[in-house]
Amino acid sequence: MEIRPTDLGLRRAVPILSERARSIHGTRHGGRLTGAIGGAQKKRVGVLGRWWLRGSGLDDATGAEVLHAVRGPLLGFVGGLCGGFGGGFGTNAIIMALMSLRGDAGPTPALAAIFGTIGAAGVGFGLGYPRILVQRWIGTPLTEGELDTLLASHPEMGLERRFLTLTCEAIRIENAPEKVTEELRAAIQTLGEAIDTLPPLSAETMALDPEALHAEAQTLRERSLAETDQVVADSVERRAGALDQQADAIVHSAQAIRRNAAQREELDAQIEALRLGLVAYYSSGQADATGLAQLAASARTVAGETRSLAAASAELDAGPQVTRAGRR
């Protein structure tokens, strides 16, 4: 079955699209033309960028990221053709036209018109052909080689590697019923989005004991009361307050951390079940299409529920930062 790079999520699609662009037209980055496509810093979609992306099915935010990733080859192509044809034929056409208007012997108005037409056609081609390239890079299905490159960056068998391995199994399926391929593609899209939504597990936060931090804070307060130097006493008291804040942050975020870990484990199990279902599907002569579609639908449902962790992630970000800075 065919899976496009953007079906895997933007984080995985960008390196693939960048490599596709580099393999065709080099790596030279453009300069002042960047704003016409999409700002390199703000990553906005400009007038040309919107035209090049028309019909790709990407929203503005995703399209801006994609164009930012391939802007170098595109702008090199645009600058080369527009500069070459516009600067060469266009400039000569203007010079010939001026000479003809002054009555100078030499180029005829017809020749000036020919040069002008060639220049305009070259500029038009230079601005239009990148749309074909962008659509090709986005629309060309993933290859096993491209997925192998992504897998190489994740040597450990974690959630990301299982997801990429699942995608490798999916693209090997041929002549599957439309219902199966639709369910699989939707499941892969949703799984990729869910994995990208999950906040990272903080090993440091999970390792800290809030009760031990409170006890240490109390010890520091007792030391502060016994301290005769008021400056030192104030410093020790502030350290105690920082430890209490760390402990409160751990308690505040404990539920979200447990939920995150549980969702990761559930996603991992769903991905592995779907991958094994794919293996069984094409190993048995593609006999159980209904069962595979059900597995894909189940994985898609679980991945959709995982998006609720975005609220937990925001909750963690809003809480006090958990570090050992108070020990300084």
Image (cartoon, grey):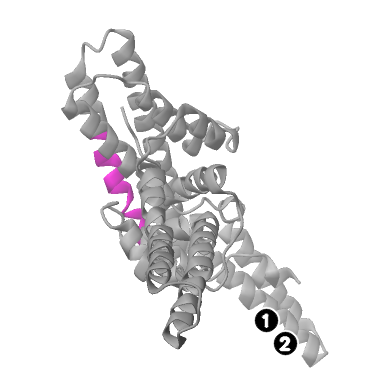
Residue span colored magenta: 297-311
Instruction: Give the quadrant of the N terminus.
Output: top left
* Residue 239 placement (x, y as % from top left): 69, 76
Mark number for residue 234?
A: 2
Name the main secondary structure of what is drawn in magenta. Answer: helix
Q: In which quarter of the image is the C terminus?
A: bottom right
Neighbourhood count class around disc 1 (C-alpha, 10 Å): few under 14, some 14–19, many 20 upward: some
**For residue 238, which numbered disc appears in the image?**
1
Q: Which residue lies furthest to the right in this view?
A: 229
Q: Do the residues labelled 1 and 2 touch (CB within 8 Å)?
A: yes
Secondary structure at numbered mark 1 = helix
Say whether residue 207 is magenta.
no
Asked if residue 7 lies left or right of residue 66, the reply is left
In the image, 212: left or right of 191?
right
Q: Which amino acid does label 1 sit on?
A: Arg
Which residue shows up at 56% across the image and 68% down it? 321
